[in-house]
Amino acid sequence: MLNTRSILVTGSNRGIGLEFIRQLSEKSNRPEWIFATCRDPEGPRAQELRNLAAKHQGIEIIQLEVNDPSSILAAAAKVTEHLQGAGLNLLINNAGILRPSTLESETPEVMTEVYKNNVIGPMMVTQAFLPLLRKASQESPQKGMSCSKAAIVNMSSEGGSIANLLIWHVGHFINYRCSKAALNMLTRCQALELAEDEILCIALHPGWVQTDMGGSVGQAPMTVDASVQAILNTLGHLSEKDNGTFVNWEGTVVPW
Ligand code: NDP
């Protein structure tokens, strides 16, 4: 079972990210610190998140724009302060974007924008939070690897699977597919590099989920509630044998 002391989610003001915060804050063994990050904590798009934080103790809303290095560093400094010497157990790189496109309509500008959000952003966020993840791993009495000890979860997509190309018939989304394939490679590299620190790294496909993004491309079959419930269950079961793999919401391996 997932039993973390601290967790941080990017893009947590709506969709899958918001649902993570909701379900985590309602768990009986809920984390002591839930860092809900979003790019505009005071704006109208964070209203639901603010309501949630008003209802539950321990949800810290922190500004984090994954495209902005200074925002990421400021967020890491704030989280470090809150943790008062403790480490961060679980980082969920959830924020992401998709822009409708085909091979012929794709532009360098859109491709760059999506890479910045979906690949470079998670890379920078992980760099900034690495000292806290290492600390969590070092201070944990647990042997081996787990999401309760120290882990990075990169929210990927089966749409970026070179073998499966999920829902190609629905849309080509070149920028998105390429960005998630790159995020998968980043995950593999992180897993190899951080194994010695016993920080578990996985790429995770949440399913085709009824969110703004999931709904924008067609009739998504899965509710956000069901997806996040399954993901939290899966995260509770991952160990070192899963390090550097690409799994779906149920923990089933997805081919690269
Ligand atoms: P949504 O579009 O519903 O939500 C995206 C979230 O990411 C929002 O909170 C948004 O914030 C945030 N975000 C986007 N760009 C940035 C940025 N530059 N900095 C900070 N936050 C940002 O998406 P989902 O909840 O559906 O998706 C979550 C993750 O799951 C994504 O990585 C997505 O690729 C992945 N995924 C989703 C699938 C689905 O079917 N829904 C399928 C496969 C993967 P804001 O409100 O400020 O825009």
Image: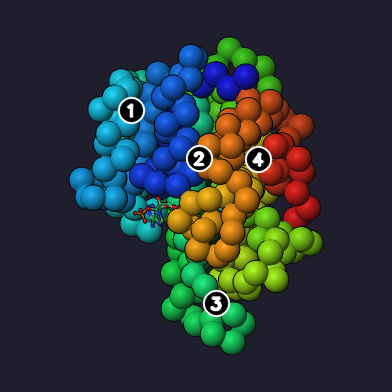
In this view, 242 is above or below 115: above
The residues tagged by marks 3 and 1 sit, at their Cα atoms, a distance apart of 37 Å
**Labels 4 & 1 near each other (Cβ < 8 A):** no
Q: Whole-percent x and y of residue 165?
A: 72, 64
In this view, 198 is above or below 194: above
Q: Residues within 10 Å of mark 2 (few under 14, many from 20)?
A: many
**Labels 4 & 3 near each other (Cβ < 8 A):** no
Q: Nearer the viewer, mark 2 or mark 3?
A: 3
Quadrant of residue 85 within the rendered picture:
top left
The residues tagged by marks 4 and 1 sit, at their Cα atoms, a distance apart of 24 Å
Q: Secondary structure at mark 2?
A: strand
* Residue depicted at x 65% and y 69%: 170
* Residue depicted at x 59% and y 37%: 226
Quadrant of residue 181 within the rendered picture:
bottom right
The residues tagged by marks 2 and 1 sit, at their Cα atoms, a distance apart of 15 Å
Q: Report which residue position mark 2 lands on.
A: 92
In this view, 178 is above or below 146: below
Q: Whole-percent x and y of residue 59?
A: 33, 28
Closer-to-camera residue (41/218)? 218
Which is more N-terminal, label 4 or label 2?
Answer: 2
Q: Whole-percent x and y of residue 235?
A: 62, 30
Closer-to-camera residue (16/246)? 16
Q: Whole-percent x and y of residue 221?
A: 62, 51
**Residue type marked 2:** Ile
**Labels 2 & 3 near each other (Cβ < 8 A):** no
Residue 133, visible in the rendered structure? no
Q: Report which residue position mark 1 lands on.
A: 59
Q: Report which residue position mark 3 lands on.
A: 101
Which is more N-terminal, label 1 or label 3?
Answer: 1
Q: Residues within 10 Å of mark 3 (few under 14, many from 20)?
A: some
The disc at residue 249 is 4
